[in-house]
Amino acid sequence: MVDLRTPQDIHLGPALVIAPAITAGFAGPYLTGFIGVVALTAQVIIALFHGGLTTANHLMQIVTLAVLTGLVVALSSVREQRTAQLAQVRSVAEAAQHVLLWPLPEQIGQLKIACLYLAAEDEAQIGGDLYAATRTDSGVRVMIGDVRGKGLGAIGEAALLLGAFREAAHQHTSLPALATALETSVTRYLADFEPAEEIGERFATALLLEIPDDDPITRMTSCGHPPPLLLSPGNIVTVPTLHPAPPLGVGGLGIENYTLDVFSLEPGDTLLLYTDGVIEARNADGGFYPVEQRVSQWTEASPASLLQHIHSDLLAHAGGRLDDDAALIALRRTPTAHRGRRHERVIHADGFRHRPATEPPGS
C-alpha cells in the first residue's frame, strides 16, 4: 500500500523480503513460506499498478523475492530439524544422567539430601563429576568424586567409579577397605582402557563418608578430594582431612594407606560436599570462588535452599558459565525419635579432634 502511494521512481517492493526473513527467526518453514507467498502477491500487485508485470525491473524483483523466500524457507527447515535433533540429544543426555547419577531421594535414613550438578560443556547434562549415596544396615554411605577431565570425555571413568561404589559399599565394613576396592577397580579399568599417550595422567579424587543413624560420629576417608564444610546455625567450619590419600588410580594403594577421620554431625547440622569445579570457578579478575565465605551467609538454610543460593551465586561469580564440571551435595541430619544417651561433640572451638581408625565410635 505504501509503495503504491510513492512516486514512480521510488521502489519499496524489494523491502518485502524482510517479512519472510523475520518470520524464519521464530516460526517454522510452513509459516515462513506462507508469509513469503503473501510478500510475492504484494509484489505482483505493486507491479500491476507501477508499469505492469512485463517490465524488466518488476520481473527481476519478483524473481529475486521468490528465490530469497525459497532460501529462507530452506534455512528455516534446516533450523527446525536441528532444533528437533538438539531436543532429542538433550533427552538422551537426561536419560544417561539418570542412569549414571541416580537422582538422590530427598531423605535417606536420618539425612535430608539435596544435590546439584553443573556441566561445563554446553548442552551437556553430565560430565566427570559424580556423587552417590546408598543405605546400609546402620546408616548411609556417601561418595562424591571428580574424574580428571570434564564433560562427555570423562563419562567412562565416572560410570565405572559409580558402579564400583554402589556394589562395594555393601561388601566392605570400613571406609579404608571400600577405598581400596575402588582403587582396585579404577586401576584395572585404566590398565585396560587408558590411551598410551595418557598413561599416568588419568585419576579420580573421591571423598567417602559413613553417617550412622543413631550416632553423630561421622567417618570420612579422603582420596585427594576437597574437604567438606560443616554448617551449624551461625557457624561454618572446614572439616579437616588430616591424612588424605592420593587420588584413585595413582598408585595401587592398599588398605593400610587409607586413614579414617571422624567428626560430629549433630541433628540440625548440614554437611556440604563439593568438587573442585566449585572452588576453582574464576571471576572476570581471575579470583577463585570463596566458597566458605559465601556459604557462611546461608548456614541456617535447608539443603535444597542452600544449593539454590550457591547455584545462583556461583554462576554470577563465574559470569554465567563454568570452565569445569561442578557437583554439590548438602546433607542435614534430622533429629532421631529416641536418643538413648547424649553424645559428646567431637568438634571443639579450637577445631576438630582426629580419632584413629581403630578407636571405637563411642569412645
Image: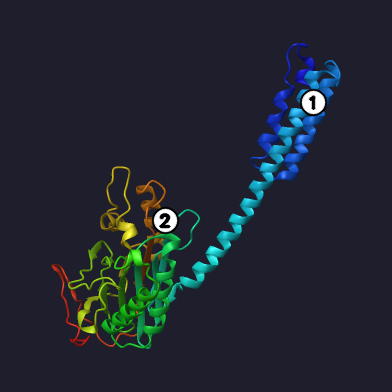
Q: Position of residue 251 (x, y in %)?
A: 25, 75
Q: Classify the position of the N terminus by image quarter.
A: top right
Image location of residue 138, percent across then percent down: 35, 87
Tag 1 residue: 43
Q: Which image quarter: residue 259? A: bottom left
Which residue extends farthest front? Answer: 196
The answer to whether residue 352 is left or right of residue 138 is left
Q: Which is more toward the observer, 276 or 58?
A: 58
Label 1: element kind: helix
Quadrant hosting residue 310: bottom left
In depth, the one of 208 and 232 nearer the eye is: 208
Quick check: 179 above or below 307? below
Relative to residue 134, is residue 30 depicted above or below?
A: above
Question: Which part of the image, by quadrant, shows the C terminus?
Answer: bottom left
Give the colour scheme shown: rainbow
Q: Amino acid at mark 2?
A: Ala
Give the crowd class for mark 2: few <14, some 14-19, many >=20 residues within 10 Å: many
Q: Residue at image x 64%, y 55%? A: 84
**Residue 321 at x, y = what percent?**
41, 50
| Residue at the left extreme of this rendering | 350
Decide: few, some or many residues near mark 1? Use Cα within 10 Å; few <14, some 14-19, many ≥20: many
In whole angstroms, how far apart are the C-alphas of marks 2 and 1?
A: 49 Å
Whether residue 259 appears in this view of the structure is no
Q: Earlier in the sequence, mark 2 or mark 1?
A: 1
Residue 172 coordinates in the image, percent (x, y): 33, 87
- Residue at the spot of label 2: 120
Q: Amino acid at mark 1?
A: Gln
Q: Secondary structure at mark 2?
A: loop
Is 96 situated left or right of 85 in this image? Answer: left
Q: Are marks 2 and 1 in contact (CB under 8 Å)?
A: no
Displayed quadrant of residue 237: bottom left
- Left or right: residue 254 compared with residue 187: left
